[in-house]
Image (cartoon, helix red, strand yellow):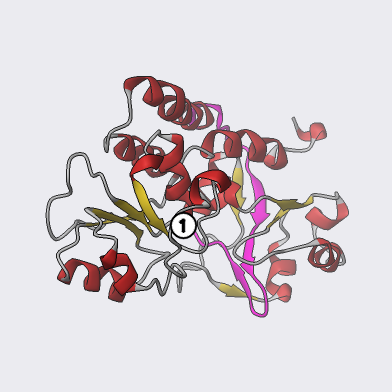
Amino acid sequence: MAAPDAPLPDAPERIVSLVPSLTEALFVLGLGDRVIGVTDWCIHPADGVAPLPKLGGTKNPDLDRTLGLRPDLVIANHEENTERVVRSLREAGVPVWVTYPRTAREGATLLREMAGLGASAATIAQVVEPVERAVEEAEEALGTGRTSFFCPIWRDPWMSVGADTFAHSMISLCGGENVFRDRAERRYPIVTLDEVQAAQPEVILLPDEPYAFAAADRDELAALPVPAAREGRIYLIDGTSVSWYGPRMRVALETLRPLLAPPAADV
């Protein structure tokens, strides 16, 4: 995680969140009453964010409106927000916390760090500790057998989850082995369907964000001569299960693990 230019406040009272997953986390941690502004993409929890000022997209929030809210903390993310936005806010004297978890364990650590903004001990026990236990249990359950997977995040061109990403870590923790893990030219390598075919993934996961993969995409991939197609293991999944760090991680791990389990005959 990038360090702030100035120390973060111990107990901020006026928080702007520019990260949809972390907006939800603030509410689940009991800190929703401190959130004074969010992005247009911050839609959870629906009742909590409905009355809040919407400041624009994650890449181009309205800086004047943001500063007009007089936040004492802005929560951002290295991947979702831009350096220009972070720099402008800091130059205006606003503390900005730039988060950047790239592994499941870092995601759990971030949730605990956010709880340090003022969550109660009871909330930490109910929200943070179950996520930490879920990560630990998944780590302990990992065996030597891995199920190869392909998980795109975009098409036209097709872009795959790369090794240096939170999504890769979450799926790997559930027993998956990324067929494009060695493609280090970019965090989300551009691939072709010929390369997918050559990689022979046993499972294909199609999240509904950032690209909204749907049945037509599944059917197209089902025509490829790969094990995932032959065995009917191409799954449309909730995109937040592989991309949102925070309270959803426990359920995400529980949901993904069965999808990556070896075929019954191989157990």
Q: Image quarter for residue 87?
A: bottom left
Task: Please say if 75 is above or below 117.
Answer: below
On whether residue 190 falls in the magenta region, the answer is: no
Q: Out of 229 and 126, give the one closest to the viewer.
A: 126
Q: Image quarter for residue 256?
A: top right
Quadrant for the N terminus, please: bottom left
Quadrant for the C terminus, please: top right
Picture coordinates of residue 240 (x, y %)?
58, 50
Task: Please say if 45 is above or below 97.
Answer: above
Q: Residue at the location (21% across, 53% down)?
A: 72
Q: Residues within 10 Å of mark 1 (few under 14, many from 20)?
A: some
Q: Image quarter for residue 38?
A: bottom left
Magenta stretch in the rendered image:
139-165
Q: Out of 205 and 49, give the one closest to the viewer.
A: 49
Picture coordinates of residue 60 (x, y %)?
41, 75
Q: Amino acid at mark 1?
A: Thr
Task: Please say if 194 is above or below 230.
Answer: below
Left or right: residue 25 compared with residue 3: right
On whether residue 150 falls in the magenta region, the answer is: yes
Q: Out of 161 and 76, give the one closest to the viewer.
A: 76
Q: Residue at the location (19% across, 66% down)?
A: 90
Picture coordinates of residue 107 (x, y %)?
41, 43
Q: Which residue is mark 1?
A: 165
